[in-house]
Image (cartoon, helix red, strand yellow):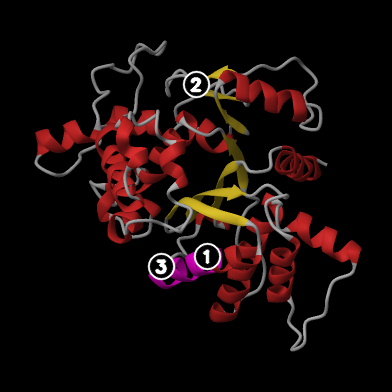
Amino acid sequence: MYKNRVKVSLETLSRSHKGARYMITNRVIGGSFIFGDVEKQKFLDLIFEGMKRHSYRLVDYVLMDNHYHCIIEIDQIEELSRDEVLRRWNLTQRTKEPRLPTGEEFESFNKKIHDISFVVGNFEQRFVQWYNKKMRRNGSLFNRFDSVIIEDGRALAFIMAYITMNPVRAGLVTDPAEYHWSGYTYRLANGKLDPHDESLVVSLYNSLNLPQQILKLPVKRQLSLLWKYFRLRLLRCSPKESRYKKYPHDIAHTLGEKIDKEGGVIDIDNARHFMLKVRFATKGIAIGSELFVENVLSSCGRVLGYKREHHANDSHIWDQVHTLKKHRKLYA
């Protein structure tokens, strides 16, 4: 019953918030470390391949040895023309001579390729099929994935920082730029993740305090400045004020300040580990401003099964960022 309710909740969120961005998190069953370099590359290839057939974009990602995080943006269903939907329909057909869909098939297919549950389930399932064949095994590989809808702007910026710092929290590297399997490193090496990456300049403009003239610059220069400011100003872990007195406030330095002081590497202390390992980042259901979370609650609260009155919860860690699901312990 609970699993069915969760599935309905995900589908309702995706239908109610077309054009939204979602943080997707999933772990390998039993926490097994099955993701080597070959597996990570295959998983990433399948995500990018799925973008050609379905209607989503990969905004950011990090692939770890036993789990992954990614941010996926779902297009509004009205954005794709009928011809484009038909082109993607043909890509999914396995016959040599693809046929035209009926009206009912067209509508069903168009809804599926705009559904977060379907697109994530598709690339996960294809990876499991590939992995099982390679390892001569059967059965499931992943748990049920967590999906958190993210508001544009400040919330998106903090979630991207959370994803980027995952390898640092795991103790694999001291600088996120050293970890190959992340969107952050990919961008540093290639300039951008996909042709739609320039939209992030507008999305993160205020959160990163980007220069006012940046929108007038060529796209390549915009992206270069975006990732520079992301690196130097975004990756801070605690707000100026917090109700949790046991965690010191003087650790709220920018990544740039840490680099300047420590000669090009980062050493994350225990307090920063706690500040970044917040459960609401993957279990919050909706993350953003108080108004954004309240709007999600009003449209989806009933189907989420809430019987008591709920409100947006201040994270107390990420400045002006709220979450729908309240956690008694923000630190894990």
Mark 2 or mark 3: name the one nearer the start of the chain: 3
Instruction: Please determine whether, in this image, residue 262 is positioned above or below residue 310.
Output: below
Q: Is residue 66 magenta?
A: no
Q: Is residue 46 magenta?
A: yes
Mark 1 or mark 2: name the one nearer the start of the chain: 1
* Pointer 3 with pointer 1, Cβ within 8 A: no
At 76% across and 40% down in the image, what residue appears? 12
Who is closer to the viewer here, 198 or 185?
Answer: 198
Residue denoted by label 1: 48
What secondary structure is marked by label 1? Answer: helix
Image location (x, y in percent) of residue 315: 49, 21
At 58% across and 43% down in the image, what residue appears? 22
Quarter in which the C terminus is drawn: top left
Could you tell me the amino acid type at mark 2?
Ser
Residue denoted by label 2: 315
Mark 3 or mark 1: name the one nearer the start of the chain: 3
Residue denoted by label 3: 36
Q: Residue furthest front?
A: 216
Judged left or right of residue 116, residue 182 is left
At 20% across and 39% down in the image, what residue appears? 267
